[in-house]
Amino acid sequence: MATRRLQRFCRGWRQCSSRAFRAVFLSICCAVMLTAAPMATQAKSSLDLGVMYQPLNRDAELGVYGWRYLFQQLATEDIDFGVVQWVQYGNEYFAQPRNWLRQALTAWQQHMPLWIGLHSEPDYFAQMAEGEAAQQAFFNNYLRSVNGTVARWQAWQFEHQQQFLGWYIPLELSDAYFATAEKQAQLHQFLRQLRERLGTTPLAISVFMSATISPQLFGEWVNEIQQLGYEVWLQDGSGTQALPLNQRQAYYEKLNCDVVFINEAFIQTSEQPFEARPKRDDELRKTLEQNGDCHRRILFSLRYLSHTAGLLYLTDVTRDDAHTGD
């Protein structure tokens, strides 16, 4: 099962923010990658364990050879698939310089299949918190813009169809925003309309727990979203620790085994600004023991894994007011 495979994957977390190390490391990568042929993708019979990558513009400096090296290392572990959280955030397309995100995902798909996240908006959480009217306005705008996001990535999707798992909708749903029957009905209508626009392509969306409704009602709500044609991914809350463990477990127990757990591979250390550190090996193992063994899993996020030490920074080291990215 995914839990045992993830335990094998855990080798201890480490961080390195030395720019000198990075420069030397990437020069070695370039020399190796110029002479090495790309690894052929191995077909996988099951997709039990994934990892999510949250694009940040500072990652553009890694370069094509750095990305190839990183994903080659990741492919040697028990990771079955990848998820890119979004390909657009507000007006940011991660295209400068040289369409770096597209190049990175092209390198990644050589080693494992990918879910591609569509677009997210910086004001999403604020609008969800404003109530029913603001939520409907957001949904209307999202439906108007989603086709443009898909169109920008459609050629890439067709070219790499064999490695394309589906679209991830990077709108994080919470019972805090959709606690009433009226708000849930409005959300479900939006999800139906979005499903119709995106056709038969597999879709996934994530949820997180705020303990606004009971565990029983939360489980029923998740079932309803699944019945609308979405794979549901639950953020386990073990990194943010907004809810105590016993309360989180009460919600876990009401979820069917088709729900995918997003295991937070970090411990939040500051709320404003957001700061976090990678979980130690023992901390991640403890998280796995709390979730049950029947669920597939996604690690959040790639930035917190030991493979990215010196490659994907937790902070923007070029700024004095640097803060954690994921």
Image: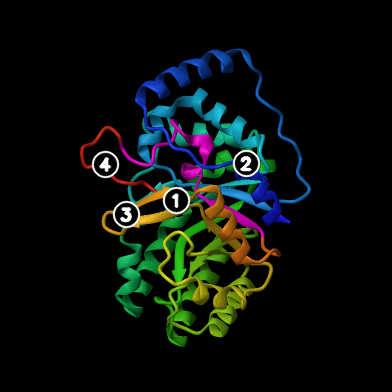
N-terminal of the pair, mark 3 or mark 4, is 3
Please give the label number shown on residue 148.
Answer: 1
> Which label's residue is closer to the chain start, 1 or 3?
1
Q: Answer with mark 1 or mark 2, whichever residue precedes in sequence.
A: 1
Residue 59 appears in the rendering: yes
Q: The residue tagged with tag 3: helix, strand or loop?
A: loop
Mark 2 vs mark 3, CA separation in Å: 37 Å
Q: Is residue 262 left or right of residue 8?
A: left
Q: Residue at x 39, y 37 (%)?
A: 313
Sequence-earlier tag: 1 or 4: 1
What residue would you read off at disc 2?
158
What's the residue type where badge 3 is placed?
Phe
The residue located at (24%, 36%) in the rendering is: 319
Left or right position of 10 against 245: right
Q: Nearer the viewer, residue 276 or 148?
A: 276
Q: CA distance from mark 1 to mark 4?
A: 32 Å
